[in-house]
């Protein structure tokens, strides 16, 4: 394979690392770019050369087209790979890259422009005979007039983008003007294009997509399909390949439709044709993504094809040598998107420094994280992707459950436990799902997660805590001063607080084990391995693995994907003095404090406004999602401490209320 000497990756996060690894495997030097908050990212560490993008806003860094092209030219790159998101489907950027004499590793500007605007893309594929969802494409005022011609519910969509941004479901025509206004604002914010369309909403459908490769001369192949129906707010959480939920006959029709589209435009590069498939297996064109998808690894694992390698080859002008009859789908693969968010708190994004990172041995982990990395609110909450491949879906599901439990991202709350619960649902295991299934199941799933959090495995957590703080061998780099002093020799009674409850434990050291008593129960403990932040031990002959990290004044233990907080006055930096509560009088005010970080995009109240409990005060954008801050009680607005555009820090005071 001939190759570029050097390419610039105009992206960040796990996709920058993914592209980098393939490029370097074939002897291509990688020029990385990074914003200041990404200085500790793995793609910066692994790149042959990394250039800082100065500035605080995305328009100054990863979206600064002229700066990116200038860096590529100044440092000897011959091509730019845009990854996904950011500028990957920006036809103007692709044109600028090629006008500068560089290769754009992706579709042609004309193809990006044609398929990137939904209204013209739908009109184009309709002329090819590919089924489309019934809908209306017009101005906002015209859409309001045309909406009664469609059966409710209807879906409002941004014409120039995807990822769920600017999408609103309307069940009552009276809601349409408000939904159009909201969708238009988000479309303009995220895509710089406020054009909208409305179409019939398929309430029970599957999201199936076909991976394609084309060499720009009309030759193209498909690499089978992926099931992407597990979504929340139109954002995919779990993807798998192949789709075992639809018939082989329907799959063939999807392949034919996808290849009809890519051959008609003589597509260049890797791309995805997305469809909705209803209960009767009627299918409808949804959109084409003229780039690499987040979920591309599941296709790579079942086909053995490196999609990034083929992107590089095609960008060099190489003809597609893959023959359709030679391509096979082997086994099954599933991908989970692990995000920094708290499902029990409205999926609020979470922040923090990564204290430690332990990757599962039985899964592929695509991520950009390094120890010490600090999460920024400027980007989405995706931390990485767990991908597992096996011979059958059942085998992969079992291996994935183990892999979720074996992943530890110390210092930040993740959605691991939530994902694990989804995997355990009978409907998911039996493949009785749709694009609405997760949203409809959320209340029950969140109640189940709260109940799981209350079922505390007390003995496992207490033993893990004590082993970590008092019995870790002196030879490890995490030995405590208590251990070095032989503290355990003269102190064998401990008081440990698990969440809000104190527990008394007595310990009797043996030759190679310990006997611990808690309540009226005795436990035989045999430590097996201390490794970084993990401890393996047996508890009454039951094998246990816990992960532990230190935060301000407490220890956080992850056990079976669930996080718990523990502390003890026997640990020097966790000592807390007893305080007596003092009642000064009847509370007259409430302070509304941020429980996330991000940017204020709208303030909906003013001082003096009379509020009802639950009324929205302001809207905060964090990690590319919007969250509403609501009044905790019937109250009157006293003082507003933030304004539109303000960058909010976690625990920052937002509004004072009088009740």
Image: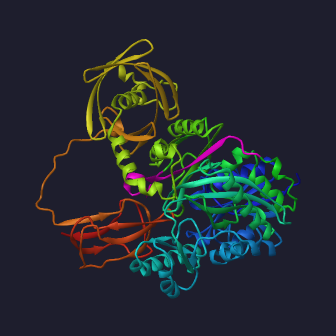
The furthest residue to the front: 280
Which of the colour schemes (rainbow, by chain, secondary structure, one colour) is used? rainbow
The stretch in magenta equals 328-352
Q: Quadrant of the C terminus?
A: bottom left
Instruction: Based on the picture, tell me whether residue 332 belongs to the magenta stretch.
Output: yes
Residue at 16% over, 49% down: 581
Examine the rendered structure and indicate whether residue 528 appears above or below residue 181. above
Q: Nearer the viewer, residue 558 or 298?
A: 298
> Toward the viewer: 250 or 192?
250
Q: Is residue 44 visible?
A: no
The residue located at (48%, 32%) in the rendering is: 478
Measuring from the top left, give residue 370's x and y in whole percent. Answer: 58, 47
Q: Point out residue 635 in the picture as x, y percentages from the top left corner.
A: 21, 71
- Residue 106 placement (x, y as % from top left): 75, 64
Asked which quadrant contains residue 628, the reply is bottom left
Q: How many marks?
A: 0
Q: Residue at x 58, y 55 (%)?
A: 228
191 and 45: which is toward the camera = 191
Q: Is residue 626 visible?
A: yes
In-image side of 143 versus 567 (left or right)? right
Say which quarter of the image contains residue 285.
Answer: bottom right
Looking at the image, residue 329 sits to the left or right of residue 437; the answer is: right
């Amino acid at each position: 394979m001939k190759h570029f000497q050097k390419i610039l990756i105009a992206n960040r996060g796990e996709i920058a690392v993914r592209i980098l690894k393939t490029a370097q495997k074939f002897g291509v030097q990688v020029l990385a770019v990074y914003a200041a908050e990404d200085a500790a990212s793995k793609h910066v560490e692994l790149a042959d050369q990394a250039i800082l993008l100065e500035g605080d806003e995305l328009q100054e860094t990863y979206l600064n087209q002229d700066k990116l092209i200038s860096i590529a030219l100044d440092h000897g790159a011959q091509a730019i790979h845009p990854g996904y998101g950011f500028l990957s489907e920006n036809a103007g950027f692709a044109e600028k890259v090629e006008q500068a004499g560089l290769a754009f590793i992706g579709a042609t500007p004309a193809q990006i422009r044609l398929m990137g605007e939904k209204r013209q893309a739908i009109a184009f594929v309709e002329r090819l005979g590919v089924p489309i969802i019934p809908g209306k494409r017009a101005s906002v005022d015209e859409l309001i007039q045309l909406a009664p011609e469609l059966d409710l519910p209807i879906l409002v969509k941004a014409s120039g983008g995807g990822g769920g941004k600017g999408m609103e479901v309307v069940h009552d025509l009276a809601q349409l003007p408000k939904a159009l206004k909201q969708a238009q604002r988000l479309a303009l914010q995220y895509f710089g294009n406020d054009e909208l369309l409305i179409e019939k909403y398929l309430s029970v459908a599957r999201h199936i997509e076909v991976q394609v490769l084309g060499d720009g001369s009309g030759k193209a192949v498909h690499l089978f399909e992926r099931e992407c129906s597990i979504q929340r707010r139109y954002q995919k959480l779990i993807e798998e390949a192949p789709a075992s939920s639809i018939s082989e006959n329907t799959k063939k029709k999807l392949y034919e439709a996808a290849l009809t589209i890519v051959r008609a435009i003589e597509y260049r590069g890797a791309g995805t044709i997305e469809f909705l498939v209803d209960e009767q297996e009627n299918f409808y064109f949804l959109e084409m993504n003229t780039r690499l998808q987040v979920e591309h690894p599941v296709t790579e694992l079942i086909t053995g094809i490196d999609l990034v390698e083929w992107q590089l080859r095609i960008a060099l002008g190489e003809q597609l040598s893959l023959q359709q009859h030679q391509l096979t789908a082997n086994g099954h693969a599933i991908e989970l998107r692990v995000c920094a968010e708290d499902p029990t708190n409205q999926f609020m994004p979470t922040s923090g420094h990564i204290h430690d990172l332990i990757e599962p041995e039985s899964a592929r982990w695509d991520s950009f994280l390094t120890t010490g990395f600090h999460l920024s609110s400027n980007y989405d909450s995706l931390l990485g992707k767990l991908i597992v491949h096996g011979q059958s879906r059942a085998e992969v599901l079992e291996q994935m459950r183990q892999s979720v439990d074996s992943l530890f991202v110390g210092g930040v709350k993740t959605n691991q436990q939530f994902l694990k619960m989804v995997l355990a649902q009978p409907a998911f295991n039996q493949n009785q799902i749709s694009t609405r299934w997760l949203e409809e199941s959320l209340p029950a799933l969140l109640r189940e997660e709260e109940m799981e959090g209350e079922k505390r495995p007390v003995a496992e957590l207490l033993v893990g805590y004590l082993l970590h703080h008092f019995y870790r061998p002196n030879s490890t780099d995490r030995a405590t001063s208590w251990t070095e002093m032989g503290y355990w020799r003269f102190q064998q009674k401990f008081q440990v607080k698990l969440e809000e409850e104190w527990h008394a434990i007595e310990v009797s050291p043996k030759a190679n084990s310990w006997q611990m008593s808690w309540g009226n129960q005795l436990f035989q403990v045999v430590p097996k391995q201390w490794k970084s932040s993990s401890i393996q031990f047996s508890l009454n002959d039951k094998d246990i693995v816990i992960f532990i990290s230190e935060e301000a004044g407490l220890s956080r233990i992850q056990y079976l994907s669930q996080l718990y907080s523990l502390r003890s006055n026997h640990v020097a930096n966790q000592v807390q003095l007893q305080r007596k509560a003092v009642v000064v009088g009847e509370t007259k005010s409430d302070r509304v404090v941020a429980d996330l970080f991000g940017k204020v995009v709208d303030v909906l109240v003013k001082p003096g406004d009379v509020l009802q409990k639950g009324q929205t005060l302001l809207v905060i954008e964090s990690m590319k999602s919007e969250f509403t801050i609501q009044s905790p009680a019937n109250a009157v607005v006293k003082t507003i401490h933030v304004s539109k555009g303000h960058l909010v820090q976690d625990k920052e005071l937002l509004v004072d209320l009088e009740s």
